Amino acid sequence: MNLLEVDSVEKEYRLPGQKPIRVLDGISFSVASGEHVAIVGRSGAGKTTLLNILGGLDRPTRGDVAIAGETLFRGFGSSRRRNRLRATAIGFIFQSYHLMPELDVVENVLLPSMTGHASVPAARSRAEDLLCKVGLADRMGHLPAELSGGEQQRVALARALMCSPRLILADEPTGNLDRLTGAEIMRLLFEANGDPLAVVMVTHSAEAAAMCDRTLKLEGGRLA
Ligand SMILES: Nc1ncnc2c1ncn2[C@@H]1O[C@H](COP(=O)(O)OP(=O)(O)O)[C@@H](O)[C@H]1O
Ligand SMILES: [Mg+2]
């Protein structure tokens, strides 16, 4: 069974008094466990919209997404299932990091565990281990504003790994970084594989795409 199955996903935005905008027009693909897939396409092509739907942060107008055989949007109990999968199977990395400015580095990494049942000391020690792994052992008590862009993206990576996800969804994770720092983030992301970790990554970087197993191009609402 594939880890991720995307089945005929369509997305229309309807704004009052305007013609609906069809952003995704029948997207189907699958990702195997442990596979790394790049999604490329022009600005406005719908890449962020697609990624948000894959992770259950936004709903498709039609179609469905399944993670390890569990559908996110259709069928009985889909909203509970979606919340559970978001908390246990999926990690997000955003282009602009999305760290909480008033929380320190460890607290930011701990955030995803707060919806789970892990004990607090166990979660804290996992967060600290992850921060050591991404090279931030000596920055744990710092606020995001005290870190560089690359360091903030490493915190975001540690946070995404906190729930031991099977799938990481990353939206231009190297977009705000210089080449070397971006390459470092990619290395950490792809090395994170203890258990097989699938990655779906939107990117404008040919170098980052070349590191993936496969590249999908989004154009006119479809995969070219
Ligand atoms: N909430 C929204 N309401 C209306 N239109 C939106 C909304 N979000 C995105 N769009 C439109 O959908 C299209 C795709 O956006 P997006 O997925 O952000 O593209 P990309 O990430 O590829 O640059 C754009 O034309 C954008 O204006
Ligand atoms: Mg985008």
Image (cartoon, rainbow, N blue to C red):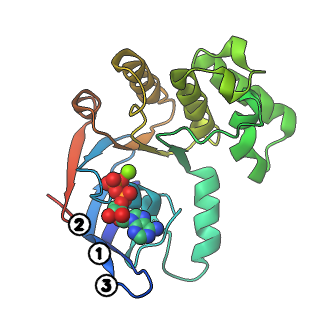
The amino acid type found where label 3 is placed reads Lys
Q: Quadrant of the C terminus?
A: bottom left
Q: In the image, what residue occupies the spot 31% across and 76% down? A: 21
Q: Secondary structure at mark 2?
A: loop
Q: Position of residue 75 (x, y in %)?
A: 51, 82
Tag shown at residue 19: 3
Q: Residues within 10 Å of mark 2 (few under 14, many from 20)?
A: many
Which residue ends up furthest to the top in the rendered image? 138
Q: CA distance from mark 3 to mark 2?
A: 16 Å
Q: Are marks 1 and 2 in contact (CB under 8 Å)?
A: yes
Tag shown at residue 221: 2
Identify the residue position indicated by label 1 in the image.
Answer: 22
Q: Nearer the viewer, residue 154 or 179?
A: 179
Residue 180 in sight in this render: yes
Left or right placement of residue 5 versus residue 109 in this view: left
Q: Quadrant of the N terminus?
A: bottom left
Q: In the image, what residue occupies the spot 55% across and 26% down? A: 154
Instruction: Work out whether 103 lies above or below 177.
Output: below
